[in-house]
Amino acid sequence: MTIEPESRFLANGTRDNRLLSIRPSAGSGSNNPNALSLKFCTQISSPRPCFCHSNDSPASFMIIKIVLTWMCAMESAGSTSPHTIGVLVADSNQMQCQLLVGALRRRPEFQVISCAADMDVILHAVADFPVDVILMNADHPRLAGQDMANVRRLHLAHPNIAKVLVLGKSNRDSVVNAFRSGVKGLFCFADYPFRSLCKCIQSVHQGQVWANSQQLQFLLEIITQVPSLRMVNAHGITILTPREEQVVALVADGLSNREVARELGLSEHTVKKYMFHIFDKLGISSRVELTLYAISHGGVRQAEWVAGGG
């Protein structure tokens, strides 16, 4: 039995090579009435193959099954995007890096290279290879560290490349600092399988953000927190309480006492008491003076939420 493509011409004069012909091999008894001669169209848009001739013998169904499997493989290959994603794996743990690179290279949609978790090496690799996504080992101190300064440097140099941090575990500070530094995704092998990493790479490449529900909760908490200004004296000692600093920040933004009360979940009377203590501590007497003082003496900081009534 032979399986070979067979060309035909369409009505518009173009050649169509999507017709597959299955014929008995030479010497297999082409005069045998049970011999199968089968043609069908492999056109993907067709709801089912168009059989030109077949019979009901078991051999027919077996061959049809084989050919239908071939069709599915062809359809799957045809649906694969012609554009691959360039992936750079930055990890100084050689064994871990080799395992990850080897697994990713089994996926046809990825073109993968690797380098050490050193910022200068990463920048050279990006210059020499078309990188779309960078996977970085967040546990490596040279690459991430507490302040993510190197990740930020990489983001400023190549803002169009999506960055994914591979973490051992995540906490509130690491998540917030990572996204502030330009990271588009956080991935933890302890929580998710390898196929999820492939989905993560594809998602960030498409401009999406990859984070789990807990990591998103950390980000939402930062967004919903009330800002505050850190007021210090000449010796660097904090003058106001955290709640008073929040009141100052809101007043400096132009909110009235009623609006401050609504924002903090307090009564207007309580806000007035805060304002009195603030004026007394800072030695000022008006909201205008408070705003000017906040601009000249206050330093913006990441505020912790202080419960109402405190």
Image (cartoon, grey):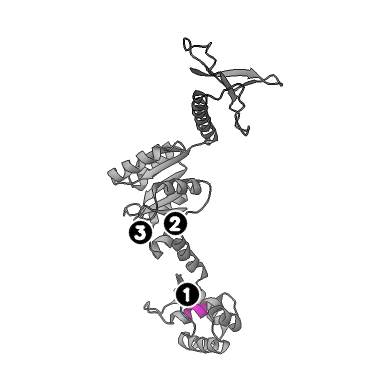
Badge 1 is on which residue?
Answer: 229
Q: Quick check: is 188 in the magenta stretch? A: no
Where residue 10 appears, as percent x and y from the top left, is: 68, 21
Q: Main secondary structure of the magenta part?
A: helix
Distance from the alpha carbon under mark 2 to that under mark 3 = 18 Å
Observer-nearest of 28 and 135: 28
Residue at the far right: name it: 11
Observer-nearest of 130 and 153: 130
Around disc 1, counting alpha carbons within 10 Å, would you say few (fewer than 14), some (14 to 19), or many (20 or more)? many
First of labels 2, 1 by sequence position: 2
Where residue 239 appears, as percent x and y from the top left, is: 42, 82
Q: Which residues are magenta?
A: 244-248
Badge 2 is on which residue?
Answer: 181
On the rendered structure, is 52 left or right of 297? right
Distance from the alpha carbon under mark 2 to that under mark 1 = 22 Å
Distance from the alpha carbon under mark 3 to that under mark 1 = 31 Å
For mark 1, give the secondary structure: strand
For mark 3, give the secondary structure: loop
Q: Are marks 2 and 3 in contact (CB under 8 Å)?
A: no
Badge 3 is on which residue?
Answer: 169
Amino acid marked by disc 2: Ser
Residue at point 49%, 37% (across, down): 84
First of labels 3, 1 by sequence position: 3
